[in-house]
Amino acid sequence: MTASGRSGMWRAAVLLLISGCGLASVPEEPADRVAPSDGYCSWITRAHPHGAAGKREGFSEFRLRVEGDPESYHPGSTYRVSLYATNPAYFRGFTLIALKEGRNGDQEEDYAGHFQIIDEEDSQFMTNCPPAVTESTPRRRTRIQVFWTAPPSGSGCVLLKASIVQRKIISFQDEGSLTKRMCERESLNGESTEKPLLDCCACGTAKYRVTFYGNWSEKLHPKEYPRRANHWSALIGASHSKNYILWEYGGYASDGVKQIAELGSPVKMEEEIRQKGDEVLTVIKMKAQWPAWQPLSVRAAPSAEFSVDRMRHLMSFLTMLGPSPDWNVGLSSEDLCTRECGWVQKVVQDLIPWDAGTDSGVTYESPNKPTAPAEKVRPLTSLDHPQSPFYDPEGGAIIPVARVVVERIARKGEQCNIVPDNVDDIVADIAQEEKEEDDTPETCIYSSWSPWSACSSSTCEKGKRMRQRMLKAQLDLSVSCPHTQDFEPCMGPGCSDEDSSTCMMSEWITWSPCSVSCGAGVRSRERYVKQFPDDGFSCTHSTEETEPCSVNDDCSPSSCLVTEWGEWDACSATCGLGMKRRERMVKMPPSDGSVCGAEVVEVEKCMMPECHTIPCLLSLWSDWSDCSVTCGKGTRTRQRVLKSAVELGECSEDLEQLEKCMLPECPMDCVMSEWSEWSQCSKSCGKGHLVRTRSITLEPQFGGDPCPETLQRKSCKIKKCGQGGMNSDERNRRKEERKKRKSKQGREESADELAGCRMKMWSGWTDCTKLCGGGIQERLMTAKKRFKNPQLTSCKDRKEIRACNVHPC
């Protein structure tokens, strides 16, 4: 019989299962009877088994399982569905369908959600009933897997049904391990539909706050957790219309999504969003988080605000968990418009990572391995790859790595929701108006805010500055008192709009000494420019100031005449505090012949611009090199280049980084001990054999070469039996022993015959169960003939056991 003929017969049997067939034994039918054309898939649901074997009680050798064993489905979410047999069972054919509860499958709308093929060599869609999945070729198998995407909201409960074909037996249960019932997850108060409404009927606008809580930590996800570099990338998203999709399961990643997924860079994604013009209302952005997780008492969860209106009522975002090949979390087209023409009050969603389909790495720090061609965006599962940090051989659900909370904080304009506002709606709107003025709880008493700190960036790169306040009293311990720190973005001096044209001056240096030793003179002081305007204009503020001074107004004859002070020498320091020196000469000594008491050398402090560490201007890091090994543990490196001039000072930043990398384990071949010495010959005369053994020191691992033989034997011959060296007495003794053995055996056989049977000779001894350390051997004597005498009831096989290889290992 050809393979196509067998497939047709199995297919005919498969199609008799679908509606409450229980368990049936079905004769093989010709393939041309499979598909009458009387209605959509009706030939499946109306088929009846030829004969019935009845439902098998306690039937459990086959099982249909949805990953994570959920009791409900989230509309639009994708689940991995497995159909498998427990050892030693197997199956040749199968069929999977997903029916809305209470429907019989006569119409297309009776089917819920849709399947996605994972392995085309294993499964395919049924030709004459597209919603059903069946085998590609009939062969022995123990497991198949497909993806199932849940239907949109409002679809009600769904029955996932499976059938198994094993030879000519169809196994199917309406209640049991081959049927899975899942109902739609109950939504929160006012929660949106999962599938965007075709048209939103809400009025006015609504303002929301989205808060991102990262739960990706070593405590919850310990396997291969990257302690050094774990982080969330900058979050990027938008509120948008139904005509624009940032990302979606089953779609392909755009260039912007790819840059987020692989590099954590939101630049390209933001560019794509802004190019959509009126299709986008608000761009949603949050900063990157290093490390990925910290207690909320240490770091507040990041948040952003956005608005929606009737046309742009969907919200999407994504952020990368890094390091990773191309793994992200996010929401896709979350609809914030309700069927009642209102705005969703709150959405809470736990997030598991999804794969962008652009890189084939399987661990957090896998080397770059572009997927060509790109694959579709899909959720990660716990059965993807044994080396995956989320792998679970039981196929359990992945622990969420993040939670997102979307909360409505305000509504503007006239509202037209069909359902009247409840108290929560009204209070939420009023509370927001008050909160915009001051969100400090009344039970928390704080000090005043401190002045803003200096910006963390000394250049025009974005930085942040901070101010603090102290919690002086907490009147109600049940109400938390947050916000003791406040941050805002900033840039270095001269970079912001407020101070871009400001000329910043240093403080005045102390006054110089008077210019004369007696009489009237002048003194001066200086300051310098700390920051020039970025518009190219020079500072108009003075850098030097003079004022008159007088010393010893009554110049006596003992006074001497000196020249004016010379110019100051250069400051001894190039930055910060230093010393400078100047001189003058005596033009006329005192007329009374005394020594001139005027100072001719003067030293004073000088202040140069503040000393700053010369920032290192560096290139971006290069890509990581390939791992230094082809298997097992190795290292990889990346480099960057110093771009600033050497004359500006030595740069202490690292120009090369080294990190560990892990590739699949190296194959390890079997390792054997040395051969033992040959044993003595097994016979004292005639032909026998010698044996020697060796043991396995290390079993093969990771695909290494298998272990060779552990036992060798060769023949031996000492001398011919009954010849040479045996006198007549010895021969007589052996002859007597043989007679005794035969006599004993005769008595045993006689006893066996009296017991009702005749026995065969003893079998040979089995091989020893161990090579050393003490094992056992067995031999059997079985009945050769059983007499038909009803009075004789005892005729049993016999077994003897003895010890062997008792020498230590």
Image (cartoon, rainbow, N blue to C red):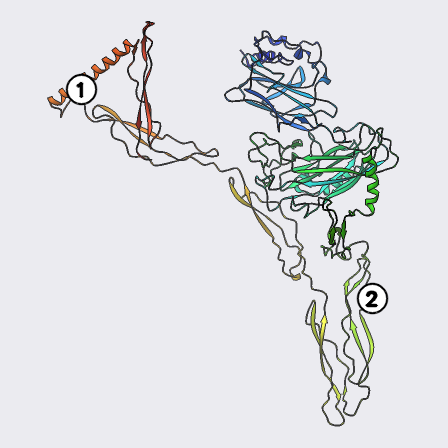
Residue 541's label in the rendered image is: 2
Foreground pick, 745 / 247: 745
SS at mark 1? Answer: helix
Q: Residue furthest top?
A: 789
Q: Amino acid at mark 1?
A: Glu
State whether residue 628 appears in this view: no
Real-space Cα distance between discs 2 and 1? 132 Å
Q: How many numbered tags mark residues here?
A: 2
Image coords of residue 319 (percent x, y): 69, 40
Image coords of residue 314 (percent x, y): 78, 33
**Quarter where residue 230 is shown:** top right
Image coords of residue 237 (percent x, y): 74, 39
Crowdedness of circle 2 by 10 Å Cα count: few (<14), some, many (20+)?
Answer: few
Q: Is residue 192 above or below residue 167?
A: below
Q: Amino acid at mark 2?
A: His
Q: Is residue 134 above or below residue 471?
A: above
- What residue is drawn where x is 73% and y is 76%? 568
Q: Is residue 499 above or below residue 171?
A: below
| Quadrant in the picture for the C terminus | top left
Foreground pick, 353 / 124: 353
**Quarter where residue 423 is shown:** top right
Q: Residue furthest right?
A: 414
- What residue is drawn where x is 72% and y is 92%? 594
- What residue is drawn where x is 58% and y is 34%? 391
SS at mark 2? Answer: loop
Q: Is residue 594 left or right of residue 6?
A: right
State whether residue 290 appears in this view: yes
**Quarter where residue 783 is shown:** top left
> Foreground mark, 2 or 1?
1
Residue under numbered circle 1: 737
Name which of mark 2 and mark 1 comes first in the sequence: 2
Crowdedness of circle 1 by 10 Å Cα count: few (<14), some, many (20+)?
Answer: few
